[in-house]
Every structure is written in C-alpha cells, then in structure tokens.
C-alpha cells in the first residue's frame, strides 16, 4: 500500500510541478501545452514507481535531471534511499504478483517503510521546490 501511495504521490507532484511552469495568460502558448500533455501521458504509464522511473518523470516534467540528489537526510545517503526504494518496489511486486512463497513482511519493516516514504516525499518536495524557485526563478507553487 505504501508503494502505491508513493506512485500516486510522484505522479501528482510531477503534474503540480509542470503546472507551475504554465505561462500566465488565458491560453498558454509555446511548448508548455505539449510538455503538459507529455507529463500527463507519462503519469498514465508509470506503473513502476522505482528510482529510474521517478527520475525520468520529474526530469521530463520540469527538467530537474536527478531528483535523487535531494534524497539524503540524517543517517540516510542518496544510495541508501535509492536502494530502499528499489527494495520496497521489488517487495511490493513479489507480493502483488503472487510469488510463492510470499516474502514475509515484518511489522518493523512496514513501520520503518512508512517513515521512509514520509522522508522521501518531503525531500522530493524540497528538491522540486528548490529547482523551481532557485534554478527556474518561479514562485513557489505550494504553500510554504
């Protein structure tokens, strides 16, 4: 369930981020409509919220080449965060697709995974916000 929530989050944040790039005015001109359509299509085909697909979705949405650079916090390196995400997605796939025997999911793992995804989402938000505001010069699309 947590991996599904992560998938929904990464899809929604990509859409919100590209919406922040929308030019002012009644009908956006230029490349924005095509970019928006592309992001919406990409979101509809994600299905695997692993590291590579998340990076590609955010990069295709706003041009931020590597969102994982922001995935570090106390006691967790970028490599740790990426590996934990890959492990969670892999475990979800084994459970959802009926691998026999199913992998055991200890309570401590599930509880820790919830905290991990909260941190991952928080740092993803911060990375996108930093990129939009400090690289692209766009006002925050989200309340601070």
Image: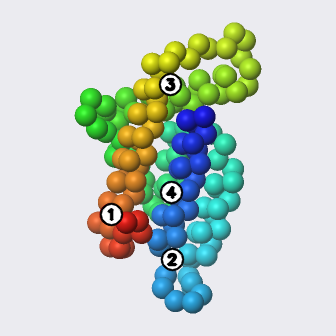
The spot of residue 143 in percent (x, y) is 37, 66
Judged from this view, the residue extending furthest toward the top is 101
Report the residue at 31% width, 31% height from top: 76
Mark 3 residue element: helix
User: Of label 1 and label 4, which has the lower sequence position?
Assistant: 4
Mark 4 residue element: helix
Q: Which residue is mark 4?
A: 13
Rendered view: 77 above or below 105: below
User: Of label 1 and label 2, which has the lower sequence position?
Assistant: 2
Task: Determine which of the numbered discs, if any, sits on residue 81 in the image.
Answer: none
Task: Determine which of the numbered discs, if any, sits on residue 144 in the image.
Answer: 1
User: Of label 3 and label 4, which has the lower sequence position?
Assistant: 4
Q: Mark 3 or mark 4, which is nearer to you?
A: 3
Q: Which residue is mark 2?
A: 22
Q: Which residue is mark 3?
A: 110
Q: Quote the CA–CA distance across marks 3 and 4.
A: 24 Å
Q: Quote the CA–CA distance across marks 3 and 1.
A: 30 Å
In terms of image quadrants, where is residue 31? bottom right
């Amino acid at each position: 369930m947590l991996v599904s929530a992560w998938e929904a989050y990464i899809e929604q944040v990509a859409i919100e981020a590209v919406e922040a790039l929308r030019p002012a005015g009644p009908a956006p001109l230029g490349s924005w409509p095509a970019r928006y359509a592309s992001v919406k299509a990409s979101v509809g085909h994600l299905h695997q919220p692993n590291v590579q697909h998340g990076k590609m979705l955010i990069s295709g949405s706003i041009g931020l080449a590597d969102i994982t650079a922001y995935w570090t916090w106390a006691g967790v390196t970028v490599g740790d965060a990426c590996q934990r995400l890959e492990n969670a997605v892999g475990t979800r796939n084994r459970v959802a697709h009926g691998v026999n025997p199913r992998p055991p999911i200890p309570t401590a793992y599930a509880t820790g995974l919830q905290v991990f995804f909260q941190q991952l989402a928080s740092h993803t938000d911060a990375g996108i916000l930093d990129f939009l505001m400090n690289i692209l010069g766009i006002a925050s699309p989200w309340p601070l």
